[in-house]
Amino acid sequence: MNKGKHTLSIFVLFLIVFAILWHVPPFSHYTQPQNLKALLLKMERSPFLYPSLIMAFIVAGMTMFPVTVLTTATALFVGIIKGLIISLVGCILSAVFTFFVVRALGSNAKQYLLSKEKIKKLNKLISNDGVSSIAILRMVPIGYTVISVTAALSDIKFSKYILGTIIGVLPDLILCIFLAGSLHNIIVSGKNHYIIWIVIVGILFVLLWSYLLKNFIKRFKKIEW
């Protein structure tokens, strides 16, 4: 158990360090979509542009970088359709990479976690209702990396994990793409009526997130031993 606790402590410390890192200069500069877009413009003519963008999602998924920021910057840079496709592929590959890395390194941490009652309940919920649980967790505003690590430390099957990830990330990606396009129209074209649509869509997504999270917590509380 001590070894498992030690491994888990390293996991948590790793996530905390990177979560803080993206909020302090000079790294915080790149958590702004416009600044990240400026960085991408330097790679515009590179033949490795698209592979580099996908690799950026994989790195972001391992280092707590805000995936929504990367999605928005990608949409602003390559356009809505290409941005959505690249973001989706990047998020899926990021989820796959994180899942297998944590599963390979986190066996001791998993054994330690499963000795805790609430973690056992969460593991059972994710394992039994794999697709819906992962989809809900991906939709609510919880760190992308945290969900990938949590799922990898559970008993969920890989196929359910990936399916749940695809279902869960699509609404968030579409929201980011929509916001990016709307902000671009407001700033560049002066179409201020998009502000109304941003507010309406924002309220709808907040209501959806609240409902899904409440549903997940309700299912969690129903599990008894």
Image (tube, rainbow, N blue to C red):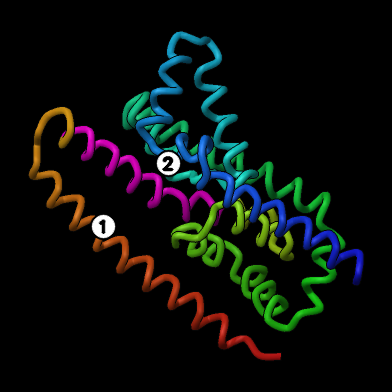
Given residues 68 and 175, the one toward you in this image is 68
In three-dimensional space, the C-alpha distance between marks 2 and 1, rounded to whole angstroms, equals 16 Å
Residue 214 within the segment the image draws in magenta: no
Residue 211 percent location from the top left of the image:
37, 73
Residue position for label 2:
69
Classify 28 as above or below 165.
above
Q: Tell me the SS state at disc 1.
A: helix
Instruction: Residue at 45%, 40% (x, y): give it.
Output: 31
Classify 33 as above or below 160.
above
Left or right of 143? Residue 152 is right
Residue 98 percent location from the top left of the image:
68, 46
Instruction: Residue at 49%, 83% (x, y): give it.
Output: 218
Residue position for label 1:
202
The amino acid type found where label 1 is placed reads Gly
- State which region is magenta: 163-185
Q: Residue 120 carries which label?
A: none
Q: Tell me the SS state at disc 2.
A: helix
